[in-house]
Amino acid sequence: GVVGYLMYGESLKSQVTLNLPSRNLSSSIAIYTTLINPFTKFALLVTPIAEAIEDTLHVGKNKAVSVSVRTSLVVSTTIVALLVPYFAYAVALTGSFLSGTATMLLPCICYLKIRSRTCRKVGFEQVVCVGIIVVGVGLVVVGTSSSLKQIIQSL
């Protein structure tokens, strides 16, 4: 965000792709690459949910049921995203709080906890982990408060 602000100044837009020059091949490649990312992540997210539903229904390897379950999940998610007001802000809130916690804070905290049992001296790894925790807490707080601010402004 800081680098984007330094590059674009007051005209900085919240979505990175909106700041790119239009009708430029490299910009088009960046935008399409950005569009592909959610599609691949969504498939990874839906697969365990679909498999759990299929196991609950005891359908085994029935291809038609599998396709219908997965299609129903995608359609129902799309309907919820379109009909629930401020859904994007709610997703941003959970993403900023939970993703930052799960990807930065918890691994470092768990590592430090395990490491403290085996080694008492403070080394480079521990200092880096504490640095990541400090930065992570800052990012989680800023992201969560920013998301809450957007939700409150939209009400």
Image (cartoon, grey):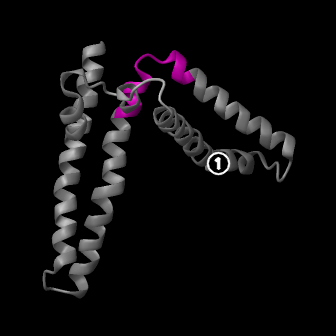
Asked if the stretch drawn in magenta spans residue 22, the answer is no
* Magenta residues (range): 80-92
Amino acid marked by disc 1: Thr
Q: Is residue 147 above or below residue 140?
A: above
Asked where in the image residue 134 lies, by quadrant, the reply is: bottom left
Residue for point 25% across, 18% down: 152
Residue 19 image-quadrant placement: top left
Looking at the rendered image, the quarter that the N terminus falls into is: top left
Q: Residue at x 59, y 21 (%)?
A: 79
Residue 81: say if magenta. yes
> Measured along the vertical axis of the image, is residue 142 above or below residue 138?
above
Q: Where is residue 67 in the image (x, y as percent from the top left)?
A: 79, 39
Residue 146: image x %, image y %?
Answer: 23, 30
Q: Position of residue 15 (x, y in %)?
A: 36, 29
Specify whether 6 is left or right of 88. left
Kindly report the secondary structure that dominates the magenta region of the rendered protein: helix
Residue located beneath label 1 in the image: 47
Q: Position of residue 141 (x, y in %)?
A: 20, 41
Vertical side of 32 occupied by 153: above or below: above
Q: Is mark 1 on a helix, strand or loop?
A: helix
